[in-house]
Image (spheres, rainbow, N blue to C red):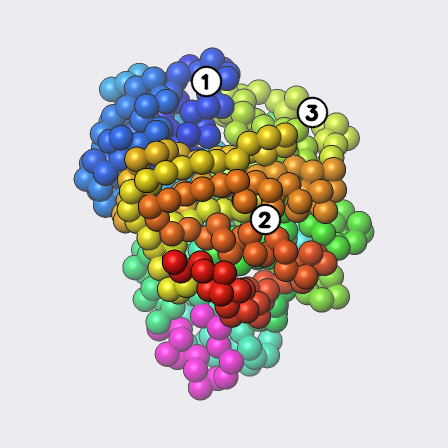
Amino acid sequence: MLKRVLVANRGEIAVRIIRACMEMGIETVAVYSEADKDALHTVLADKAVCIGAPPAKDSYLNIGNIIEAAKVTGCDSVHPGFGFLSENSKFAEICEDNSLIFIGPPPAAIALMGDKAAARECARTARVPVVPGTAGTCAGPAEAAAAAKACGFPVLLKAAAGGGGRGLRRVNTEADIEAAFRAASSEAESAFGDGSMYVEKFIENPRHIEVQILADKFGNVVHLGERDCSMQRRNQKLIEEAPAAKLSGETARSMREAAVRAAKACGYVGAGTCEFVVDRDENFYFIEMNTRIQVEHPVTEAVTGIDIVKEQIKIASGEKLSFTQDDVEFRGHAIECRITAENVSDGFRPCPGKIEFLHFPGGPSVRVDSAIYDGCEISPYYDSMIGKIIVHGENRADAIRKMRRALSETVINGVKTTLPLSHLIMYDPEFLRGGFDTGFLERRLPELLDIYRKAGGDN
């Protein structure tokens, strides 16, 4: 078992990892930027090391400083969390070169699945359906235009190294290809250092379903079921649930089995997620694999009883999975609402500032993952997500009622958040019916915001 883990992250995921390590008897070292000197993760860890100035490039993305912090504090491993360096194959290689165990997949698997075009080809070899499009990357706008005409408009131009909606453009006509290609490629180059692009057929308002997998170093791979992540705004998830409502058992089984095949095909080790889009006829297509812990992992933990972070650590320690696929049982339904410090009435503008008063919900089957506290500062330097509220119920209706109650108990004063919007969604008829798609917020947001304003939400 590992002895001392450096947590190369911040916020709620750093706290989540530190807590898991504490329960396993493993020491932790937190790293922090100058902006995070009073952050909760620095207090909970056994040791804390400042690694640079507030901008992420000077701190949480500064590989040299992170490796040095791990070495001077005697760490034997590094957990990258999500975001920042979590899917950086070079960082994983550097950890290994410095005799540090990277708590994640092998660098080769990260590199393969991080290249979205190569990941599509890997999925094809594993007999996993992929969205129609190019076999690899496009040399330029002309090649992208030819591919788009072959599969039919509209299409998506997607960055091979992309994620989070960056380097992504919808194109409706051939005349728009060149400008969209150059803009998306430039954005991808700036965000990821790689402007390579590929083309996918655009599937109108699909459902976004992902499957959690775990794989050990001995070739054992299991899935932990699927999550519905269709509640999105501009490719950013807002609410997730497990299992996916109104998805046939046959489709769910096929998708779960496909995720396991994809993981085996790329030599995967650790926790990972295969993401799929599902059309109205329940045809599903692989779009990418996230080679890290996901923000929404708690809903899977709630319905399986399996601690995914602890399993990551055990796998990195060289242990075999302690359970088989037949041992995994699914119980009830779980929902997660992300809390972001954003002003929903002002185009979801980030809202940094000081937390003047805070009260989180409690009670049976309610979980809160957060790193905020009374008096803490929400920094403008990082992602605006400040926490997650997770509930588990006997069924979906029970989980929705629990989430309504949990959200109504939550008070965050000092900054505006997305809590009121999530609360309204819990009463929305389309949401209550289940089976909604990624176009939900685009359709419903104007009316939801109108209800919010009439209730005095801007006061």
Quickly name the residue at label 3: 323
Q: Magenta part of the protein: which range? A: 169-182
Q: Earlier in the sequence, mark 1 or mark 2?
A: 1
Which SS does the magenta portion mostly show? helix
Say the numbered circle drawn on residue 240: 2
Secondary element type, mark 3:
loop
Judge by depth and name the residue closer to the eye, 363 or 211: 363
Q: Earlier in the sequence, mark 3 or mark 1?
A: 1
What's under tag 3, amino acid-wise? Phe
Secondary element type, mark 2:
strand
Front label number (3 vs 2):
2
Residue 412 spot, x, y in % from top left: 41, 43
Total marks shown come to 3
**Residue 35 within the magenta-colored segment of the rendering:** no
CA distance separating discs 3 and 2: 26 Å
| Residue at point 75%, 27% (across, down) | 327
Residue 161 spot, x, y in % from top left: 42, 55
Judge by depth and name the residue closer to the eye, 262 or 448: 448
What's under tag 2, amino acid-wise? Glu
CA distance separating discs 3 and 1: 23 Å
Front label number (3 vs 1):
1
**Residue 256 occupies quadrant:** top right
Which quarter of the rendering shows the C terminus? bottom left
Instruction: Locate residue 196 relative to residue 293 in the image: left or right.
Output: left
Quickly name the residue at label 1: 22
Instruction: Locate residue 10 relative to residue 23 in the image: left or right.
Output: left
| Pointer 3 with pointer 2, Cβ within 8 A | no
Residue 32 spot, x, y in % from top left: 27, 32
Instruction: Say if 88 sits above or below 233 in the image.
Output: above
What's under tag 1, amino acid-wise? Met
Instruction: Say if 219 sits above or below 281 in the image.
Output: above
